[in-house]
Amino acid sequence: MVKMGREAQHILPKNWGVKVINYKSYNYLIVNLKKLGGPDLIVNIWRRGNFSALYQVVLMQSYDALLKSMKPGDIVVDAGANVGMFTLLAAAHVGPSGLVIAVEPVLENFKELKKTSKLTG
């Protein structure tokens, strides 16, 4: 694990319900994506890379135009899925009748992507 400072919590407004949990001297964040305009999912952010993905995809809304173009039943390929933040949002947009295929070549990110997919189905 990478130590994350509590400063990450202060980037997000308090009404977004971000909690900082300390576990074995490491801090991680618990974030409800619904409060950020995403699907009703809780994500654990315990690496700086995971927070970077949350920041780019959700907070900066870098992919909003693409997400808005998705419809239920669409098929989406997320090449270079990183830890799966965009994958989660795409899955929420295409719904149970759609399909999101996430591909990640970096082993550490792929392990995180697998955790994300297990947590969310």
Image (tube, grey):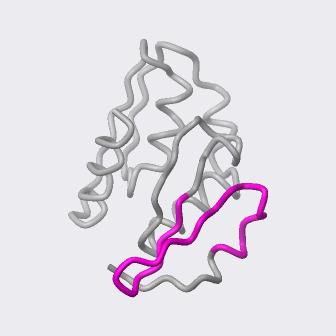
In this rendering, is residue 75 above or below 83?
above
Of the 4 image quadrants, the one containing the N terminus is bottom left
Identify which residue, 5 or 112, lies in the foreground.
Answer: 5
Q: Nearer the viewer, residue 60 or 28?
A: 28
Give percent across and percent down for residue 18: 64, 62
The spot of residue 10 in percent (x, y) is 72, 76
- Side of 23 where 95 appears, left or right: right
Q: Is residue 51 magenta?
A: no
**Residue beneath the point at 72% across and 66% down:** 12
Q: Is residue 20 magenta?
A: yes
> Compared with residue 86, is residue 70 higher up or lower down, i.e. above or below?
above
Q: Is residue 90 above or below residue 109?
A: above
Residue 118 on image: x %, y %: 29, 41
Relative to 68, say whether 27 is above or below. below
Residue drawn at the location 47% of the way across and 72% of the way down: 28
Q: Which residue sits at x=53%, y=60%? A: 30
Give residue 100's quadrant in the image.
top left
Q: Is residue 38 left or right of residue 119?
A: right
The residue sitting at the left extreme is 107
Q: Residue at x 39, y 87 (%)?
A: 25
Magenta residues? Answer: 9-30
Give the quarter of the image for residue 15: bottom right
Asked whether, in this view, residue 2 is left or right of residue 67, the answer is left
